[in-house]
Image (cartoon, rainbow, N blue to C red):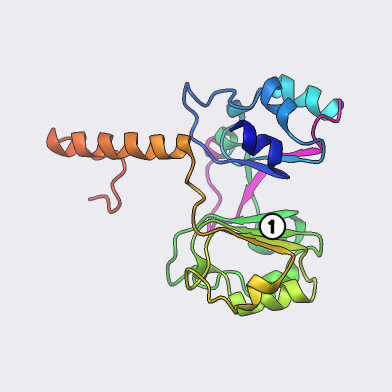
């Protein structure tokens, strides 16, 4: 955790709110971050010590923070659901045009395949960064290569591609405005512990004939 904070230009929080993650980022953690770093929170507000964050921003301990989450949906969620995560409804085109960071966190379905293509990339700011932590095929990779080469968008950060791994001669690997990791976004100690705990909870529920907490296809 300390090494990650000290080395990262962008620190993104994608965690459940638990007693262990409440105020996960406080004064100490903010003090470890680069003065040029940006803190991004798309999980729950309480995982950050808000007072410490205000102080860090005022004192330029970190460069910036992105806390306001928007989401594109076929229909808006309820006001209570939006308030619970600090989100607000946005049409897809508006979201692409307004966002500095566009993160893809969707299942791969016939509806989301090539969700981001040439048209969508053309709507994004030339200073925007596209982040994909879902599945590679939700982006039209040929269109992404073109957008990165032509500076249609500033950069991309991809934890997933298609295929995985990419061929060594793939054009994405030759660009200096893209970061690619080998589908290891969850390979942290904390995430591994959480996944193990969730798996155990599911198995115990099955053995005790109780509802499964993380059922993939609910009955």
What is the x, y in percent for residue 17?
A: 50, 29
Can residue 21 be seen at all in this image of the molecule? Answer: yes
What is the x, y in percent for residue 212?
A: 24, 40
Q: Secondary structure at mark 1?
A: helix
Q: At 53% from the left edge and 76% from the top edge, which residue is drawn?
A: 167
Can residue 144 be seen at all in this image of the molecule? Answer: no
Question: For this rendering, which residue is in front, 187 or 18?
Answer: 187
Q: At 56% from the left edge and 38% from the top edge, which residue is drawn?
A: 43
Q: Is residue 175 left or right of residue 42?
A: right
77 in magenta: yes
Q: At 74% from the left edge and 26% from the top edge, which residue is drawn?
A: 31
What is the x, y in percent for residue 5?
A: 66, 35
Q: At 29% from the left edge and 38% from the top edge, which residue is drawn?
A: 213
Relative to 212, does residue 124 appear above or below in the rendering? below
Question: For this rendering, which residue is in front, 190 or 141?
Answer: 190
Q: Which residue is mark 1?
A: 95
* Highlighted magenta segment, given as a residue range: 59-81
194 in magenta: no
Q: Is residue 72 left or right of residue 194?
A: right
Query: Residue 177 lies in what quarter of the image?
Result: bottom right
What is the x, y in percent for residue 197?
A: 33, 34
Q: Is residue 132 left or right of residue 111?
A: right
Quadrant for the N terminus, please: top right
Relative to 218, does residue 64 appear above or below in the rendering? above
């Amino acid at each position: 955790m300390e090494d990650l904070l000290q080395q990262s230009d962008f620190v993104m929080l994608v965690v459940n709110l638990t007693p262990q993650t409440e105020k996960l980022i406080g004064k100490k953690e903010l003090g470890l971050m680069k003065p040029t770093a940006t803190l991004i929170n798309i999980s729950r507000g309480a995982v950050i010590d808000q007072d410490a964050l205000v102080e860090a921003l005022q004192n330029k301990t970190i460069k910036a923070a992105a806390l306001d989450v928007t989401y594109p949906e076929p229909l808006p969620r309820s006001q209570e659901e939006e308030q619970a995560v600090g989100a607000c409804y946005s049409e897809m085109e508006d979201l692409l045009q307004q966002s500095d960071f566009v993160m893809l966190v969707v299942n791969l379905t016939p509806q989301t395949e090539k969700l981001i293509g040439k048209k969508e990339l053309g709507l994004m700011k030339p200073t925007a960064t596209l982040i994909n932590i879902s599945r590679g095929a939700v982006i039209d990779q040929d269109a992404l290569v073109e957008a990165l080469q032509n500076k249609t968008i500033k950069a991309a950060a991809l934890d997933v591609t298609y295929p995985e791994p990419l061929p060594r001669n793939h054009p994405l690997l030759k660009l200096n405005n893209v970061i690619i990791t080998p589908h290891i976004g969850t390979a942290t100690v904390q995430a591994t512990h959480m996944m193990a705990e969730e798996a155990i909870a599911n198995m115990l529920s099955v053995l005790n004939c109780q509802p499964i907490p993380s059922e993939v296809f609910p009955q």
